[in-house]
Amino acid sequence: MNVKYMYSLLAVVALLLIAWIGVAIGLKVVFGVIFPYLAVIIFIAGFAYRVMGWARSAVPFAIPTTCGQQKSLPWIKPNAVDNPFSKSGVVARMALEILLFRSLFRNTRMKLHQGPKLAYNLEIFLWVGALAFHWAFFTVIVRHLRLFLNPVPMPIQLLENVDSFFRLEILYDSFKMALPGVYMSGLVLLLAVTYLLLRRLFIPTVRYISQAADYFPLFLIFGIALTGILMRYFFKVDIVSTKELTMGLVTFHPTVPDGVSTIFFIHLFFVCTLLAYFPFSKLMHLGGIFLSPTRNLPADTRARRHVNPWNYPVPVHTYEEYEDEFRDKMIEAGLPVERMPEETPEEQTDTDEKE
Amino acid sequence: MNDKKLIIAGLVIFIAIALFPFLYNMGKASPAPDPVLTPEAKAAKQCVRSRQYMRADHMHLLDQWRHNVVRDANHIYVSPNGKQYEMSLTRTCLECHSNKAEFCDRCHDYASVRPYCWDCHLDNPKENK
């Protein structure tokens, strides 16, 4: 039985309770000022530490994965993106990987059909879910800059307008929603993270390989998205006081205004946890994707020799040098030599060419 | 090989982006906006609902009002303390808060909110521009 998700769920519930109780007993400064600063410091320092650790690692072999025809004879058409030979090919491949998750798109599922016949089907839902999740999360983060910048720059206002272009207002007595404008990105994020979570919970093969560390970020991001949506559409928060708090953080004049509600502190505490957890978790794929040797190396192994740039300088004594040193003795002993002594230069070049 | 330099350059760019809000606001104090109450508003002391409710929820109230007037032809709002108000942005809200630029806009601009009230309620007669 796999109960790993329970640990993660309990951890997130515990975080919620910690923030709730902490604010209730008057630790607003801790949750509104100290934890956010700590989280940002841990995030930046941890991120730099992890990336520098990778930067120090050797890449002893060229190990690009190839998904197409390598550059070869002139009449064989190479696949410049899937088997990049040049730097521009690598850039194109990396861009497609980072922006569109191309390798995830290739995801297939093996199925045994009647017959028995084996078939590989395109498994597109993970790709769709991941794309929706990452792009929605990115939009949400950029959109949140309105709470951290004053005055709010035009591009961010533009993004807000595009994100909230459709109007939806539900005004039943029992269920009211959607004022002010509905941000699609928030809803897409919640739906996508729910899908990614349910996928891990209900597909047996995926559940089998899922660890607590896989569930925790999903539950945490689910909590962040949910508290954000609740705060915007349901338990309205005083946005001006909230921005006063966030602006206080980024201008180094931290204040905790009275109007800030508990749910905001819960939301903020979740975000702080995510930031502090980020560098030490699988979420570091944000930085790691740029440093994947299977993607960022050109597939030119047959044309160029890959030298490990961190190779330890080993003093070598090549066979040529060895022969130069002992040629006379070798000839004396009757051993074959590659190059005869200087007396017969023409003959020597001839044999060299033949070889 | 200069991979290390490239990686450090990328890392510096990432950190600069991550810390962008700190850099953008560097040296700028940004006090919370201070909406100005007109003498009429001050004299009334109490808005339609409590101050805290109005700060967080006024958009809900206005939406409800619009719905009630436009769909149900119901023009009278009874506040929890029993007082009756006409459900009208122009004739109730803007009657007291006749200074849109100093009252509404200050917070809306601060929070980067662009309500569409003003798509229709544009020619506010109480405000002389």
Image (cartoon, coloured by chain):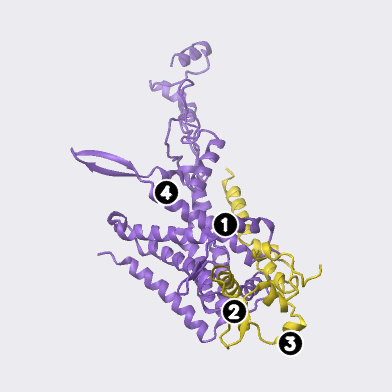
Chain colours: A purple, B yellow
Outermost right residue: B129
Which residue is drawn at the image coordinates 58% and 80% (left, top)? B77
Q: Chain of mark 3?
A: B
Q: Is residue A61 visible?
A: yes
At label 2, counting other C-alpha atoms closer than 10 Å, the crowd grade (few under 14, some 14-19, many 20 or more) is: some
Residue highlighted by disc 1 = A163
Q: Which of the 4 quarters of the picture holds residue B29?
A: bottom right
Mark 3 and mark 1: Cα distance apart in space: 41 Å
Give the image quarter of residue B20: bottom right
Q: Nearer the viewer, residue A198 or A277?
A: A198
Distance of label 2 from label 3 (alpha carbons): 22 Å
Q: Residue A276's spot in the image, x, y percent?
A: 51, 67
Q: Secondary structure at mark 1?
A: helix
* Residue located beneath label 4 in the image: A127
Q: Could one spot residue A257 in this view of the protein?
A: no
Task: Respond whether the residues carrying marks 2 and 1 are from the same subunit.
Answer: no
Q: Residues within 10 Å of mark 4 (few under 14, many from 20)?
A: some
Q: Which mark is residue B76?
A: 2
Q: Amino acid at mark 1?
A: Asp
Q: CA distance from mark 3 to mark 4?
A: 60 Å
